[in-house]
Image (cartoon, rainbow, N blue to C red):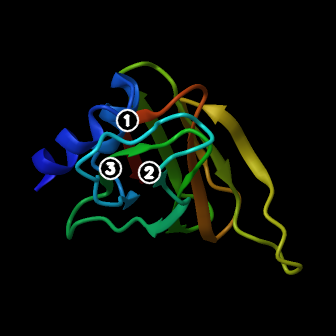
Amino acid sequence: MFIPILSRLKGLLVPSMLALAVLPVSLSLALTTPSSNPPDRSPANLDNPILLAQKSRTRRIRFAPGRNYTIVKDAVIRGTRDIYLLGAQKGQTMTVKIESVESNAVFDLMAPPNQTGQSRTIKQEAVSWNSKLPETGDYQIVVGSTRGNATYRLKVVIQ
């Protein structure tokens, strides 16, 4: 299914954008059918508009039965964030590590919200972190990119 779409896109996208179109992430892709005559692709007259977008996503991390860790492999597009929620208890030790091919993926770690709904940042723009947890609740691991798009591998351990 991607081959016919990609062949239509080939003339409209630069090679780096073409790679973006096939990333294993949730993309919204809108195309119009090309006419038999090649369209005028000047900025003022785009007959075939292309919209590529990814929204920030929030997902809950769950460990497999009998495991105290999980590994998430995914990608984030520049300007968006993947937010992972993880319930943990005060006094447990959490280890978070992120790796990316271009060393451009980082995470922020947020403590559970207090009574007024405010979360405080525990660690910012990190690639690894390990410590005892100060409170019980849902911690947020917010993954983003320091530059460009980032394909990452996130490992989270609770002991």
Residue at image position (47%, 36%) is 41
Pinpoint residue 21: horizontal percent, then vertical percent. Answer: 32, 43
Cα separation, mark 2 vs mark 3, equals 30 Å
Cα separation, mark 3 vs mark 1, equals 33 Å
Residue at image position (56%, 68%) is 89
Pinpoint residue 18: horizontal percent, then vertical percent. Answer: 32, 33
Mark nearer the viewer, 2 or 3: 2
Q: Which residue is mark 2?
A: 50
Residue at image position (33%, 23%) is 15
* Nearer to the camera, 85 or 19: 19
Residue at image position (20%, 70%) is 65
Q: Amino acid at mark 1?
A: Leu
Q: Can you say which quadrant of the picture contains the C terminus?
A: bottom left
Mark 1 lies on a secondary structure that is loop
Mark 2 lies on a secondary structure that is loop
Pinpoint residue 32: horizontal percent, then vertical percent. Answer: 35, 60
Q: For residue 72, which numbered disc appears in the image?
A: 3
Q: Are marks 2 and 1 in contact (CB under 8 Å)?
A: yes
Mark nearer the viewer, 3 or 1: 1
Question: Along the horizontal axis of the image, is 29 left or right of 124?
Answer: left
Q: Looking at the image, is 80 positioned above or below residue 91? A: above
Question: Along the horizontal axis of the image, is 129 left or right of 100?
Answer: right
Which of marks 1 and 2 precedes in the sequence? 1
Q: Amino acid at mark 2?
A: Ile
* Nearer to the camera, 87 or 72: 72
Residue 23 figure quarter: top left
Residue 119 figure quarter: bottom right
How crowded pointer 2 is (Cα within 10 Å; few <14, some 14-19, many 20+) is rated as some
Q: Which residue is mark 1?
A: 12
Cα separation, mark 2 vs mark 1, equals 9 Å
